[in-house]
Amino acid sequence: GSSCVCQPGYRMVSSNGGSSIICQKCPENVSGVTQDGWNCITCPKGLTSEGKCKCLNNEILVERSIDGILLSEALCIRCNGSEQSFSASDASGNRCVRCEQTFINVSKSCDCSSPNILVMHNFPFFPTPKGVATVRFGQLGITLTSAWFLKNLQSSASACWLYSNLTACQALGNMCVMNMNSLSSSSTDACGLFQYIYVNTARLGIVHSIAFWRHNLPWLYYGDQPGLASQVLEANHFPTMFTFKGTEKDVKLQFIAASFDAAGNFLKWQNLEGGILQLCPDTQTKLNAAYAFGTTYQQSCKISVSKILLDFTEPIFYDLFLEYKGDNGQQYLWDVPVLNLNLQYSEMFVNQGSNMNNWLLTRRFLLVDALSGKENDLGKLPRVIRIASKITISIRLVSHTQKGTIYPPLLTIAYTDVLLQNPESQSVMVSFSVNYEMNQSEAQIQTDITLGVLGGLAVLWSLLKTAGWKRRTGSSIIDLQTILKFLVFYAGDLANVFFVITAGTGIYWLFFFKAQQFVSVLLPLPSQEANFVTYIACAFSLKALQFLQLLVSQLTIDIFFIDWERPKGKVLKAVEGEGVIKSGAAPVSIWRTYFIANEWNEIQTVRKINPLFQVLAVLFFLEVVGFSNLALMDSSSSLTRSSESYIAPWSRILRFGVSAALWLAIAFLQVIFFSVFYERFVEDKISQFVDLCCMSNISVFLLSHSCFGYYIHGRSVHGHADTNMEEMNMNLKREAENLCSQRGLLPNTDGQTFQISISRKMRLHYDRIHETLTRKRGPARLLDSSANTFEQSTRAYNTMNKFLSSFIDHVHKEMDYIVKDKLLLERILSMEFMEPIEKSIFYNDEGHSFSDVLYYGNETTLLIFDILFFSIVDLASQSFVLAAILTYLQQEIFRFIRNTLGQKNLASKTLVDERFLI
Amino acid sequence: GSSCVCQPGYRMVSSNGGSSIICQKCPENVSGVTQDGWNCITCPKGLTSEGKCKCLNNEILVERSIDGILLSEALCIRCNGSEQSFSASDASGNRCVRCEQTFINVSKSCDCSSPNILVMHNFPFFPTPKGVATVRFGQLGITLTSAWFLKNLQSSASACWLYSNLTACQALGNMCVMNMNSLSSSSTDACGLFQYIYVNTARLGIVHSIAFWRHNLPWLYYGDQPGLASQVLEANHFPTMFTFKGTEKDVKLQFIAASFDAAGNFLKWQNLEGGILQLCPDTQTKLNAAYAFGTTYQQSCKISVSKILLDFTEPIFYDLFLEYKGDNGQQYLWDVPVLNLNLQYSEMFVNQGSNMNNWLLTRRFLLVDALSGKENDLGKLPRVIRIASKITISIRLVSHTQKGTIYPPLLTIAYTDVLLQNPESQSVMVSFSVNYEMNQSEAQIQTDITLGVLGGLAVLWSLLKTAGWKRRTGSSIIDLQTILKFLVFYAGDLANVFFVITAGTGIYWLFFFKAQQFVSVLLPLPSQEANFVTYIACAFSLKALQFLQLLVSQLTIDIFFIDWERPKGKVLKAVEGEGVIKSGAAPVSIWRTYFIANEWNEIQTVRKINPLFQVLAVLFFLEVVGFSNLALMDSSSSLTRSSESYIAPWSRILRFGVSAALWLAIAFLQVIFFSVFYERFVEDKISQFVDLCCMSNISVFLLSHSCFGYYIHGRSVHGHADTNMEEMNMNLKREAENLCSQRGLLPNTDGQTFQISISRKMRLHYDRIHETLTRKRGPARLLDSSANTFEQSTRAYNTMNKFLSSFIDHVHKEMDYIVKDKLLLERILSMEFMEPIEKSIFYNDEGHSFSDVLYYGNETTLLIFDILFFSIVDLASQSFVLAAILTYLQQEIFRFIRNTLGQKNLASKTLVDERFLI
């Protein structure tokens, strides 16, 4: 629309170079207009629709003499095709030029008349042109007669076969590629012709010492019989040693492609960088990241068909090579085989199976074929286009390599056929990926072995624990409960096994994959991670079972606070209304018990670490410091990624590895901090509680099992604790100055905490007293029992207090106890070898192991449960932030449950009113 | 490298179309080779370096006759340039064709000999060609003689001036653009020539009724005198109404560019989509996002000069338009003015100032000029290239529009000149951005007014508070402390003012910008956000001051626990060793006081909301649900963004707005939840404490100021609380059955909590008792004072207990008190109108306002401090995760400080040993 032209039959008279011209009608008798549009001329053989002169097909139009003089009448001249001149009309029909060499070779003239047909008969088969020119689009079930094949297949096959014309051979090969390299039995199609020539021109020799590459032909197949694939792919190693951290050359995959157009002309060599094979648009940096060694690359997008048609008017054929340096420093090329999933061999899609021996590897491929789908007219839109919709480059590491040796890469292509209906609205999903694999079967076997061994150990360990538990419950019958208990123990141990294996695997991959210089391991593919995810899921569900069991057992312990305080004497009290002074035992204040119960209630959910700091510190390191970047499937071990660079997909194994490593490291640091610094210099809630027991003259009697529990000896060394501030301060001072005896249960010892193994008799007695309490929850009687309940529970409290304190004081000879140290093995196995038949046994315990009935003593279980919860949420949502938030919520919910129900249990077992447990 | 050729002097004998040919030497006497390479021929005028025939410049080479017969000797023929034929050699020298119309017009022949020079003298000035052909690269200080200018400036200027040849005029205009449209006084350069022609061809008329657009010339300037810019930019409104949520047309900026090559040929119309102006590569979607209305777009990258040279061999010139639909539905174009920052007007960079009246707007621009910098030879690399390194499109909204009306957009370009030294290693930073602006002065004024008014109110309010504080301290002198106190109050109030303004602004922008359909407001530019950030910084630092002051005042309160318990009677006690039974007052157990102190210690940092849940919930909504996406400077109000789409830059105002809105909303929900559900049905720590006081027969006497404080009446309704479990349970039961009197201080009332305003006399007495405590910290005396200290403090405790309980019991007539209700205004202003001169005053207080000395009563301050802390970290780091983690840490640290120091203060004021505060 930027310049003007005259109508047919008018000549130009003036023009200012663009927007305005003047035209003049040519006279009737001189009706033609010259090609340049400025003059009128007589045409000998009629006019075109533009009003210019027209000549026959093999004639040229002459409007000027050689020296430029305009003729009054144009001439149509036939070019002289005789032996000396070999001239014919050029494409525009303006000039006689030397004609095509092929014609000259064939007929010694420029004519392509009768003898040519005769010559064609030399070709071994001469199928009907219609027959071979069909292209089959298997996905759509359409078979087309392709205009391009119709025009060129016959001639290029002939030229290739007869004269070994390289361009023609390339063109023939390209047509075979457009037919998806499919070899059928009919063998009258492009690939059939190609194979025929290939077989029958073996004498012409091979190039570059490659047996499949004939001198005269393009290299299309790695041997046409199936079965060679595994040899091609695994017999040799690619010579370059790849590293993750090194110079430019060793960390890049230098793919080089030779490109050809459909007519068989060589176009150029080109590096694949810059997105040659990537149909999805992206920035240069991100596109090139596909070829950084070790970076798993995935790209996919939807492209509109109209854009594809615009960008790929001509199909381009690629022969792919990988560059390497020889010993002498020279550049060599290694051929990259192609696995075309659409290839048919005897009507079978042999390449779609996973059996490598059936594969038929090929060489040449194309990205978009909008040519073979054109029917009738090459100038029109094709009916079908074929798009390489899924391109995958697989890099396979040689097993046991320490030097980053790989097998030859494999390019896998799946084509999609698109029936063109409305290109504007049609679109097609395309993807490009680079995968790194290695044989994981060995790792899998090792994992399985470890799992088997540790699983077996777990059974043994659980059996031991069950035995210990049986001893502690005081029964010896193997009943259903025992089996259930064993299963619960086994669940916990198995969860630990799974956790150790998954955390070990994750951290192993993290360190060995990310830290290696010369590549020796590659990550499992996402599909190979399924086992791993199953393991984590198992670990989590088993651990959850153990955790719930722990919670339940902690919420049902028996506990009693033994008050050692005795009335200080008689109290003289004026009885109101009577004026008489009575004397009675001074009541012992219950407030010390309230205090102790209150404190016990508060330390129920104290933990060895700060769980919230833990979660937030992990989140900080992952998201703010950038440790999460270590979980990307690329070779970089840096903690930051620029926003412009390509972000590789996540590896679930690495995500678990990096988060588990951080959890464990931070937990370890926290444990160190709390045990070495905080509990020593700031506060230690557990020791504080023990001290408080002693100050308040109250002992804690705990039964976690029927016949096993803990005892905290809190008898005041001052005799009395229920006194005023003056005396309390005095007591504190005396103790600080070491003026009193020691606090221990045995004289002259400090041991205040014990594990106790009580005899059945003792337990029965305990239960009998306790029963009076539980009886009140029976059915309502006729008489109002609420007053009774109060009295009953108070009486039960007093009875229990008296019984337990007398028990500790060795009053009951039939229920005596001895104090001893635990054996080393008993400590290690945390079970008791000796059965408390006659006497109960008190084991000295400096480690405050009564915290086993609190959160405090079960830090490992809680921590592993938190780690697994965090990881499960992360694996499901791929978001560390969400995982952290949900882990916090989970902690809060379980802590709330533990606190609330623990408080209820405490109130019911110790008879302390719940209103004082605040 | 893909085909073979014969050496000069050899002809081709056979060829298979590519890799192998056979050559044969031509005989000595027939030494030339034909153009097609297949024959030998005699050349009349010598050989070229390729061994082909050579003719003179204005001759053509003839090797074949018209009908294609090969001549034995080639001919060199001069084309006939006479009037009939007007023929001359074509570019390749093979054929005579009609010569250029310009020559024909000028000389009626194809010769360009002597008369042409004569014609040139008609041009008004005829500077030396060297003079005008220079191009100045201002940034480098280099002036080049450009080969392109040398070749074309003179001729195109002549052709444009004499014949109004449009292509020549375009070419001249392009040269002016390559000269940066600079107008100098010398006016012999491209722009000078353009201006001369522009001025002197006014008679030729204008196109499209645009006064600056001559019919014969390209449109380069909006009037050549400065001062028209503001009229062009602001006199008219662009006709389209833009919306944020609507059909395709109204939400896109439809930029259309007409493109021309350097020679002046029109190339095509093209839409800017697809990254026409964006030099940085990116995906299509992201590139096109630049033209979505409302999306602030920024893109910048470093491009290597070699890539620029490869991609932009020819400069392309653009005339930019914005498309709109007229009333009749037709498409119209609106011209987009260009502000070229490199333009010089009389040697001054007039466009670089901010004064719009000095601007000289232009039209045409280019992206990369690698042409004008070529010296001597057009085929070689240029010495200097010029790159449009910073392109900005500014969309300016009309003030007070409700319909999304904008002024004409402005394209601002800054060019960078690069001296070519080593293109491979050189690179240049380029950027492209689209900005949306509106006049923010009105919003600024409104903010200033609000700030002034609220600031004034803050002064008044702070004065009132200071007055109230003076009353509470019981002094009336205005001393330095008063002024400091006033400043602290003022800081707190001013912080609130700043917070209200910033939160209001942020939420205002969030709602009005994101929710609008027809665009009526646009966000402030990043540079306009400076004020806002300053306000937040002020708010934070003032709030921090207030928070610290709050912390200090809470850590220094006076507190005492009054124990109402009286000894139950005399106790008969056997004195050891003497065998005598003595009687003495039964000691009152201190454990209730320990219990109360312990609980008080625990509620110090209880808050109305769960601060940690708050932080994590905010983080959850921001990062997981995706509210953070609302802070992007684009028109979308969706919470998710696909990973393929363009991510607009953050707006700091919106970031603050969205996070403040979330903080406030979640805090509000939490307050509702805790006050309506949790504290009513689960637990209310504050009420629990009050109840506990009553159960334990202990009152709390608190002095937060010298003469002001709080009193929690805890006298047991049962007379005694220091008793055993039986009696305690009985008491609880009696109270539950409403069998006892009410708990209030006054008979038959429930009021347990009071604000107290005590008289100076009372305070003096209190201080005197307290002094005996503090005296112990004086210098060590000669006698060992540690025993004394104990006794002293116990005595002080007893004295204080006695004094305070007798005070409450109205024993001291000279220090009596009255109980009354507070006036409404007193409540609102939280000050007391009445001075406690004679009697102290107890104000009923149902609202537990003693929590003002705890975290609990200062939730607003703490919450605002947390919000501001979060926002400050976020503004500095642009990371919500980091902000959340640091806010948590901050809370923990201050909570630790408050707890630890609060505990110390409690221990020292109430004489409870710190070891019991666990």
Image (spheres, coloured by chain):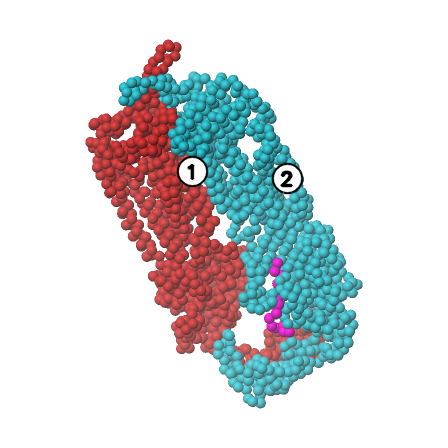
Chain colours: A red, B cyan
The reply to whether residue A81 is in sight is no
* Rendering coords of residue B401 (x, y %): 68, 45
Q: Residue furthest front?
A: B782
Mark 1 chain: A
Q: Does the magenta segment cover residue B384?
A: yes
SS label for mark 2: helix
In depth, the one of B167 and B306 nearer the eye is: B306
The chain carrying label 2 is B
Residue B311 place in picture, x, y as percent: 58, 65
Asked if residue B418 shows in the view, the reply is yes
- Residue drawn where x is 65% and y is 53% of the image: B394
| Residue A499 location (% of width, % of height) | 35, 47
Task: Return the mark for residue B451.
Answer: 2
Q: Nearer the viewer, residue A188 or B231?
A: B231
Q: Are marks 2 and 1 on the same chain?
A: no
Q: Nearer the viewer, mark 2 or mark 1?
A: 2
- Relative vertical location of residue A673 with respect to residue B695 in this rendering, above or below: below
Mark 1, residue position: A892
